[in-house]
Image (cartoon, helix red, strand yellow):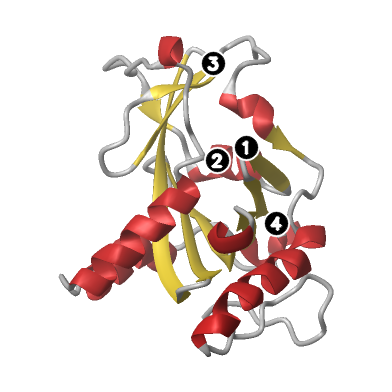
Amino acid sequence: MNRTTNRTPLFLGTEVTTPSSKVKRRKAGTAGSFRRFLIISCCLSVAGIAHADEIAAPSPQARPMTAVELYMLYRDKSWAWSEGAGRFDDLSRRFTARTGTGSTAASAQGRWIVTDDGRMCIDAQWHMASGVHANITCFDHRLERGTIYQRKEPTGAWYIFKHAVSAQKDEFAKLTTQNLVSSDLATASAQIKDQKQPAGHTLPTLLVKGNDNDRQPN
């Protein structure tokens, strides 16, 4: 598409393989890496939590959503969570997030990636009191007769993310064009710094939208 010529490509062969290849490199098998996984999983556990009556597996006729469909679903949207939100900017596929308060405060910056096998992945650096931790989290999507099913990989339960006729209780309803993240990144940064000071650590500078020194992940 001509309008995205100067932006990060929507998907490429290297983009499609990026999440799995990075995950393999990061499988250290140490207690520290497992602990980081648990911490970041808790940060993202607020996303994709379905109502009990919405737990439902897609039928064999359901197909994976395409990269273009996923791009249209998430681009320039914020996903509201119970304690925070994640933001999927179209420009450079930039992902930012903030969640928690006080000792549980965390923020993230990175990229979001979509693939033709129905996956939307978040490749980000998570800033929290324990340090800065790299993590990739993927959500799988299936489409059948207008209904979108989603699950958090690798073991999350399938549930109805969006009904064919959207319902207010759908998780899809928590996607909004309003930016729920950028204005709160500075506050999250301050809270994390306060938590680290007693331990004598130094917090890496968070990238705040609008800062001329912002850098995109490699």
Amino acid at dot 2: Leu
Q: Nearer the viewer, residue 131 or 145?
A: 131
Which residue carries the number 1 mark?
Answer: 73
200 w.r.t. 182: above or below: below
Which of labels 4 and 3 is toward the front? Answer: 4
Q: Earlier in the sequence, mark 4 or mark 3?
A: 4
Cα separation, mark 1 vs mark 3, equals 13 Å
Cα separation, mark 1 vs mark 4, equals 12 Å
The residue sitting at the front extreme is 198
Which residue carries the number 4 mark?
Answer: 89
Which residue carries the number 3 mark?
Answer: 146
Q: Judge the density around disc 1: few (<14), some (14-19), many (≥20) Cα neighbours within 10 Å.
A: few
Amino acid at dot 4: Asp
Cα separation, mark 3 vs mark 2, equals 13 Å
Q: Secondary structure at mark 2?
A: helix
Question: Which residue occupies 50% across, 58% down?
Answer: 11
